[in-house]
Amino acid sequence: MTSATVTIPRERAPARHHLLSRRHREWGLAYLLLLPALVVFGVFTFYPFLKNFKLALYQNPPYPGLPMHYVGFHQVTSVLSSTSFHQSLVSTLLYVLMVVPVGLLGGLLLALAAHKAIRGMPVFRTIFSSTVVSSVAVAAVVFGTLMDPVVGLLPWLGIDPHPAILQNPTWALPAVSLIAIWQFLGLSFIIMTAGLQSLPDEILEAARLDGAGGWAMFWRVTVPLVSPTLFFGLVVGTIYAFQSFGQIDILIGPQNSQFTHTNVLLYYVYQALSIQNDPGVAAVLSIVLFAILLVFTLAQLRFLERRVTYAGN
Amino acid sequence: MPATELAAPPAPPVVAGVPGPAAPPPRRRHRRARLVLRYVLLSVGAVAILFPLYMAVVNSLLAPSQIAHQPPPFFPFHPQWGSYRKAWTDGDLGIYLRNSAIQTSVIVAGQLVTSILAAYAFAFLEFPLKRTLFIVFLMTLMIPFEVTIATNLATVSSLGWFNTFPGLTVPFLATGFGTFLLRQAFLQIPRDLREAAQLDGYGHLRFLWSVAIPLVRPALAALGVFSFLGAWNQYLWPLLVTGNDNSVRTVQIGLKQLINTQLDQINVSLAGTVIAVVPLLVILVVFQKQLVRSLTSGAVK
């Protein structure tokens, strides 16, 4: 590809015409390399995303088989003002509020306990990270058994609400959150450990020399020091929590989710789509979900951006 | 590494480890006590985290009547391995595992290839609209897959891809996060290397294949493990596109089905769960470093 005569820096290449054609070839190659990813993104990310805004304005026909008809913002307002939407929103927020803080704090405590090179630590680290590989189906089956009114541990522990915990309007959501917390602990531990390892050890040591110990040091020194990591974990955890629904699908199911207040937004989308067969409603809900997640993803992108400027230089 | 003794909530504030003229023996005793305390804490954490999985293993080896026994048995004194055979054959878990293996390998391979190509363009080539296109890639991180399922289902069905591996995999063959990760890795390669390779007559593709890719192997491994985890654990999309045909159904959906059909055989569904999670635990132990690297690399999707 290069001309054989080049011996001096290429920027001062002799044949301008030659250089141009080489540059064009580079352009072509670049677009060719980007093409596969762009096709996938175009078809399966951007097109369906934009299509939501159109679908939201169309309603299902009264009889199956007829085309969907345009109703304008009527459908948007009717979904957004419905009680089931409000209930779903409240459930989602409660769920996120239970999962994220507990998961983050638990991960931080585990990371602090494991932040020392003592014998056996790699084993503990592996165990603490382990829940990151467990799928939502695995977690649901495992916890579902433990929470079962007949074969589970609850009667033995003296906790045996009626109706059973996963059919109970008060306890179903906390129970489902517990599963998500357990699943999130691994990721939270990994993030917090990385954050702690990036801290200069001298600072923690100095705080100890000043006599700050126990809780005082935890809240006044450690938490402020790891606050960027905590914030990153908060963003990642929130996105994760908003996107979970598998354990609800497996353990509670569509019939019970409204009644037990576990109809989180994503599950609502899933039901609208595959049970009510109503893409219009699903589209409205998707846009709401996107709008909420956008705030957190933008925060996440700021982390990426920071890395861009570091690495770009 | 200095100690961070603050993990113990009830730790008495006296143990602040102040060095001073005090006689060494009590200090050493303190240090020993704290080490013991740390191990106790670590063990409590480990037990709490492993307990659910441990109970799944125990219960998978018990007969259903034993599982329901009160107080619950915490150790399988007479393990019954038949549940594993049942889950494997009656529950079709063998087929589902094979399907998951195919689905996951296609997605991992696809994501690696498309990310390598795109990342190379962003890192080594100059072309018009480069910045804009990079932003387009980053924008995909802002659109969670869940938001696109309505139309993607319609697309997949119009392509005739319901209950097929293309339907399971093609929507995931590119990743903005992966492209970003590999671009960062490519940017670490010294420019001089490219110049030198160019003087040696290397074209871009040959440089990519024989110089750039070997140099970013750690980042490739990190992305590979990350993609593997995401693909293997997918739930929503496989649930929607594999309908009620078990010829392409993945193991996660198989688990759901296993619980629904074998309510009286909890040991069988738990055996299935253990079978489904073992490959991932192996991956975790072997590739822990790469996994941690990808999960903490500034963004997780």
Image (spheres, rainbow, N blue to C red):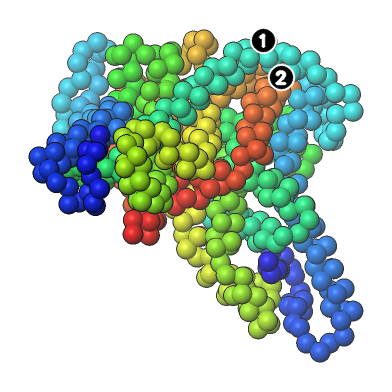
Q: Which mark is residue B90?
A: 1
Work out whether disc 2 and disc 1 sit on a shared chain. yes
Disc 1 marks a residue whose amino acid type is Asp
Q: Which percent across, then down, holds residue A180?
A: 56, 42
Residue nearest the viewer, comparing A69 with B272: B272
Contact flag, marks 2 and 1 (Cβ < 8 Å): yes
* Spatial CA span between label 2 and label 1: 10 Å
**Residue B77 locus on image (x, y percent):** 90, 28
Q: Quadrant where the N terminus of chain B lies? A: bottom right
Q: Which residue is painted at 18% across and 40% down in the image?
A: A23
**On what subunit does the disc labeled 1 rest?**
B
Residue A241 drawn at (x, y percent): 48, 44
The quarter of the image holding the C terminus of chain B is top left
Query: Image quarter for residue B273?
Result: top right
Judge the density around disc 1: few (<14), some (14-19), many (≥20) Cα neighbours within 10 Å. Answer: few
Q: Which mark is residue A110?
A: none
Instruction: Work out whether residue A44 can be spotted.
Output: no
Residue B268, labelled with which disc? Answer: 2
Q: Residue shown at 43%/21% (left/top)?
A: B168
**As drawn, which residue projects farthest toward the bottom?**
B21
Residue lying at 69% horizontally and 72% vertically, measured from the top left: A214
| Residue farthest left in this picture | A17
Badge 2 amino acid = Val
Chain identity of mark 2: B
